[in-house]
Image: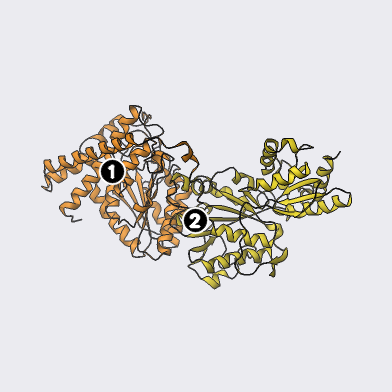
Chain colours: A yellow, B orange
Amino acid sequence: MAIMTYVDAIRDAQRQEMLRDPNVFLAGEDIALMGSSFGQTAGLYAEFGAERVWDTPISEGQIVSLGVGAAAMGLRPVLSLDFCDFLGCCFDEILNQAAKMTYMLNGQTSLPLVIRANLGGEIGAAAQHSQCLEALFTHIPGLKVVASSGPRLAKGLLAQAIRDDNPVMCFEHKGLNGMSEEVPEGEYVVPFGKAEVRREGGDVTILTWSKMLHKCLAAAATLADEGIGAEVIDLVSLCPLDMDAVLGSVCKTGRVVIAHEAVETGGFGGEIAARLADEAFDYLDAPVKRVGSPFTPVPFSSALERNYQPSEGKVVAAVKSLFA
Amino acid sequence: MELEKKDYLALYRTMVRIREFEETSRRLMLDGKLGGFLHLYSGEEAVAAGVCSELAQTDCICSTHRGHGHIIAKGGDVRKMMAELYGRDGGYSQGKSGSMHIADIAAGIIGANGIVGACIPIAVGVGFALRYKKTDAVAVAFFGDGSTNRGTFHEALNLASTWCLPVVFVCENNGFGMSTPPARATNNRFLSERAAAYNIPGVTVDGNDPVAVKEVAAEAVRRARKGEGPSLLECLTWRHHGHFIGDPALYKDPAEQALWLTPERDPIPRFAKRLLDGKVATDAELDEIKAQAAEEVRAAIAFAEASPDPSPESMFEHVYTS
């Protein structure tokens, strides 16, 4: 184990997989000479050279199409799209090309493609650089969608995404870039579709992912002081979704809060709530509660964004409302 | 360009096979045997025939919603394509994709595509992979005039040029982006002029002359194969039918349409006359090619109609690679 920052872990995953498989290559804006906007590919151009690490023009559609064409031919492209907000510039390439190719070709080719993009606000980046758009991609059959909540998962999920034979939307969170924790050295993968119980509790289940996990863990600590035992589950992977883990916990506690940084309306929490209504109705002792961002674009001023972001306090309040 | 008799006849055969497939498919759809959308390639056969005659099996193509001609010219299986149009189990994709998404990876057909302009940057990705693997194969993107106004076209030409990738961009200017002629969609007289913006060769050619197309394709493929980078070919041609079957194409000038359908303009009778006048082939030889093409399509229909519907559970297969 080694202490790594989130950014170092992302870089380490790419490095390990490039060492392991010569078909892995990196492409994206400013990833080679600059080493990416936050350093997620720093040093890889120097180590692997111009044949493996490609600075692209600012042409998001072409970046994803480069990956689609190359993956169809058996390579393993890892594409950096930087801010998830920019995925609007290549939405056709993701939803109509990458996601559908294997199906439309009836399995003649697989499409091992990784699209890295960062989620999240709280850095004063305003409405076009702060969104959490992961739910959009869970609506598209053919894509896998994962989101890491810290350095260990960032490394393990990205490495797994690179080995996966399908297009994977691998979401990072720029608000975690400075976080450090112990991360396995060398090759390390985290399988998709396995949620992680990050804190056990018997009174309420809190489902979350990405950076929001940490607010939920803080909320759970506060709730514990007030005698409420919250079980906090990091879903890790939204598609495939570990519904067994969700149901197991909910059937035990009978109460659920789903907390995500994304806008609450149309967020992935709604999908989970609907599934719980369908599959766990008889076990629920209270309505399923969601915590998310309000239905507005992300505001710039810290005075505004402070109130925009779903907070630990909102999670605590949501949980308490289930016991009122 | 000096060609041997077998080369001339190969071009003619490819064009005739495409026309036979397209016109038969049209009748099948009008008879209610085919569903979905069908975008016919009739009138544009010289482009696919000319370009693909310069390609090896290891070369790859990416195609469009109007893709049957490219698939036939690149060596696709007419029976499996017909069965796919029928939506049957024996089709290329077991009925999952229909007319607009035919692919045959083993034959270097990376796929037709239902989104206008989407195949152009994908072909760049294919060309990238061919070079990454250190082959001398090339990637060809076929696309219509309409798609040259999408950003994908410009992003693709820019990247292929900047990275000097082995890609040949083949624009089939058939006079209409659905209903809109290029003159109403762009201020360029020739679409090949746009190559200059990306510092690559661009040429406009008579797209109804398979030999003229073959000639410019030969140079573009040679350049790509030798690592000299991409080229843009604009092939001037004419779409005989509407955008799809069911489009009466009322936006076409009737006189212009009639002109393009004359034996002097239609690429197949025009090329036949050239072969006969030049004593390259006899009537009997050309008739034999037509008869073989008709038989090939008849056999394809028999194959398709004998093929069962796909099983209901097959709908759930290949959403993901497991």
Give the residue at x 29% y 51%.
B52
> Do tag 2 and tag 1 residues touch (Cβ < 8 Å)?
no
* Screen quadrant of the C terminus of chain A: top right
Q: Residue at x 25, y 54 (%)?
A: B215
Tag 1 subunit:
B
Question: In the rendered structure, which amino acid carries the disc numbered 2?
Answer: Gly
Viewer-proximal residue among A185 and B322:
B322
**Is B263 left or right of A60, judged from the image as shown?**
left
x 33%, y 38%: residue: B82
Letter of the chain that mark 2 sits on in the rendering: A
In the rendering, at what x and y percent does residue B270 appear?
Answer: 20, 41
Q: Name the residue at the top extreme.
A: B31
Mark nearest the camera among 2 and 1 is 2
Q: CA distance from mark 2 to mark 1?
A: 31 Å
Q: Secondary structure at mark 1?
A: helix
Q: Does residue B66 sit above or below A68 in this rendering?
A: above
Report which residue position mark 1 lands on.
B45
Q: Mark 2 sits on what residue?
A: A67
In the image, residue A64 sits, relative to residue B314, either above or below, namely below
Residue A251 can be seen in this image: yes
**Camera-side residue: B139 or B239?**
B139
User: Residue furthest toward the bottom?
Assistant: A47
What amino acid does circle 1 point to?
Glu
Secondary structure type for disc 2: helix
